Amino acid sequence: MTTTEQNKEIQQTISGERQRLLGFIRQRVPSLSDAEDVLQEVFYELVEMYRLTKPIDQTVGWLFTVARNKINDFYRRRKTDALEEVIQGSGEDEERLSLFDMLPDSSTQDIMMQETILEALSEALEELPGHQRFVFEMHELEDKSFKEISTMTGVKVSELISEKRQAVLFLRERLRYLYNDLFL
């Protein structure tokens, strides 16, 4: 196939699938500009495949598979920041946000977003010191009171609160981008 023929095929594929792919990607990334960036990466892969003369049997299926992979790459390369609380102002203007408030409703059918959130949280939790992680998981994920945790561990409630606060501060900074992308 000549370069001219390749260019024509590439142009037809891009013209025919651009809107569907953009819609697919847009449902899975936070903004239109991010979706367009991912779409450009998908089309770049398409051009590379043609230039390397690797045949693509089912172009549309291949494009959507590449789009899924590029969306995953998009979330992996994002800087990490905060999650648990959002401060809108200072002191009394503080708004509290639960971890589970960030998870999409099952009615949204956005399983990919939920997996991304849980994966980012899991990675961030792995980075916490063991004692902070334990207190955070018991209090937030297992819904145990500080008094219950104190009874289980023999550690003073005030120390547990301090450990949880350190964990929250770390997670807030580590996962801030996630909140900004989803809610701002």
Image: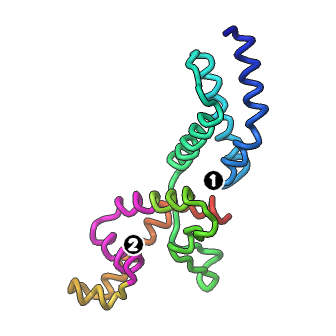
Residue at 65% across, 23% down = 47
Q: Residue at x 58, y 69 (%)?
A: 106
Q: Which residue is mark 2?
A: 166
Mark 2: few/some/many CA within 10 Å (<14, 14-19, 20+)? some
- Report which quarter residue 159 is drawn in: bottom left
Does 175 lie within the magenta span? no
Determine whether label 1 and label 2 are within 8 Å by CB: no
Looking at the rendered structure, the kind of residue marked 1 is Arg
- Residue at 73% across / 13% down in the picture? 5
Pick whichever, 148 or 89, lies toward us: 148
Residue 145 on image: x %, y %: 36, 88
Q: Nearer the viewer, mark 1 or mark 2?
A: 1
Chain-order first, disc 1 or disc 2: 1
Q: Is residue 34 left or right of residue 167?
A: right
* Image mark count: 2
Q: Secondary structure at mark 1?
A: loop
Q: Disc 2 residue type?
A: Gln
Residue designated by label 1: 28
Part of the protein shown in magenta: 121-143
Seen in the image, is 99 located left or right of residue 163? right
Taking the view exactly as shown, the residue that stands out farthest to the front is: 57
